[in-house]
Image (cartoon, rainbow, N blue to C red):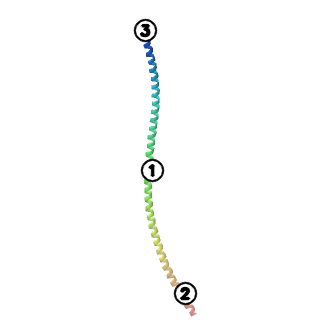
Amino acid sequence: MEEKLNTILEHLEILQQGQVRFEERQDRFEASLNIFGERLGQVERSQEKLVSSQELLAINQASMEERQIRLEENQTNMEKNQELFALSQVRLETKLDNFMVETRGNFKHVQSQLDRHTNLFKKVQLKH
């Protein structure tokens, strides 16, 4: 009976050692699981930041596209204004040319009247 008791005690000691090893492994597993949970949390936070950055990027891209459209519209308006300015400049040059021609004609008319009056005054002076 004592032998059976010794055998049972040996088996009990082996079982207790196995239980201790099992608990140590379970503690390491729990520690690893905690580390995994922390890393998973970090990954989730990083993913949230990435999603937030992508949303900001999409907003910025939409804003840039709107600015690009406005720039293109402004450029088109500037080109139209430049064409109108060129037409106005041509009209102004034409008007200036016409004014110069008219002024020369008036000067010639005034000069010919002045010449006639000068000749008339000379004739009048010679008679006196």
Structural distance between the alpha carbons of marks 3 and 1: 86 Å
Say which amino acid is labelled 3.
Leu
Callouts 2 and 3 close, C-beta under 8 Å: no
Q: Earlier in the sequence, mark 2 or mark 3?
A: 3
Vertical arrangement, residue 84 with respect to residue 34, above or below? below
- The residue that label 3 is drawn on is 5
User: With respect to residue 75, does 10 lie above or below?
Assistant: above
Residue at the limit of the structure toward the top, as seen here: 1
- x and y, in percent, of residue 75 in the image: 44, 58
Q: Label for residue 120?
A: none
* Residue located at (47% from left, 27% from top): 31
Please state the horizontal and vertical placement of residue 20, each as a whole percent of the image.
46, 19
**Residue at 44% over, 53% down:** 68
Q: Please give the residue where the numbered disc 2 appears in the rendered image.
A: 118
**Real-space CA distance between mark 2 and mark 3, rounded to the nearest whole angstrom:** 162 Å
Q: Which residue is drawn at 45% across and 42% down?
A: 53
On residue 64, which mark appears? 1
The residue lying at 47 percent from left, 71 percent from top is 93
Amino acid, disc 2: Thr
The amino acid type of the residue labelled 1 equals Met
Query: Residue 89 in the image: x percent, y percent?
Result: 46, 68
Q: Which of 126 and 98 is in front in this view?
A: 98
- Compared to residue 89, the image places residue 56 above or below, namely above
